[in-house]
Amino acid sequence: MSLRNWLQRGWLQNHQSSREEIRDLFGIADRDLQAAQTAGLPGDWRFSIAYNAALQAATAALAAAGYRAARESHHVRVIGSLEFTTGSNAKLIRTLDAFRKKRNASNYQVAGVVSDQEATEMLELAALLRTEVAEWIRAKHPRLL
């Protein structure tokens, strides 16, 4: 499987990224990484904010690779694409996908399902991914930084 296969299946669309788009996606990720550290926020909110930071970083990688996720299963595709963009390890992708499901439950089904420990883990994962994506773009698509 590859991003080209995903494109043929309709899971992705071709996309021409720009330096401004990558800057803006990283700007959102950085804002959210900072906001997720706000004292006094419930774990659910810190988790959700940190998750969004990770999603924006993964979106930047996909955009730099020349693609955009289709609307259906958008988050699933953005997260899964990390295998083909940055080459993220399977454990990181599985963990981020599990956190995607946890975020969905927290945002749409029931409050209080996220522990403070999970919020901290999500924040650490998001920060790691932000760094990983920036390094990958710098190495593979330096014109976008």
Image (tube, rainbow, N blue to C red):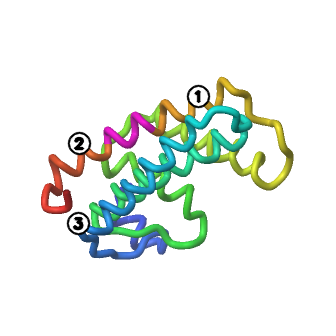
Above-or-below relation of 89 to 78? above
Quadrant where the image shows the N terminus: bottom left
Instruction: Kindly report which numbered mark, 2 or 1, lies closer to the viewer in this rendering.
Output: 1
Q: Which mark is first along the chain, 1 or 3?
A: 3
Tell me the residue that label 2 is attached to: 135
- Residue positioned 74% across, 34% down in the render: 114
Is 130 contained in the magenta span? yes
Q: CA distance from mark 2 to mark 3?
A: 15 Å
Q: Residues within 10 Å of mark 3 (few under 14, many from 20)?
A: few
Q: In terms of sequence position, does the residue under pointer 2 or pointer 3 come before the other? A: 3
Residue 59, image x, y percentages: 42, 58
Figure label count: 3
Percent across and percent down for residue 58 are 42, 52
Residue 19: which numbered mark, if any? 3
Q: Amino acid at mark 2?
A: Glu
- Inspect the image, locate mark 1, and give the three-letter code of the amino acid beneath it: Thr
Q: Is residue 49 left or right of residue 63?
A: right
The quarter in which the C terminus is drawn is bottom left
Side of 135 relative to 10 (left or right): left
Which residue in the protein does label 1 denote?
120
**For this rendering, which residue is in front, 32 or 8?**
32
Between discs 2 and 1, the one toward the N terminus: 1
What is the crowding at mark 2: few (fewer than 14 residues within 10 Å), some, or many (at least 20)? some
What span is colored magenta in the figure?
127-132
Q: Badge 1: how crowded within 10 Å, few (<14), some, or many (20+)? A: some
Evaluate if marks 2 and 3 touch, with contact meaning CB atoms under 8 Å apart.
no
Residue 128 x %, y %: 40, 34
Closer to the camera in the image, 74 or 56: 56
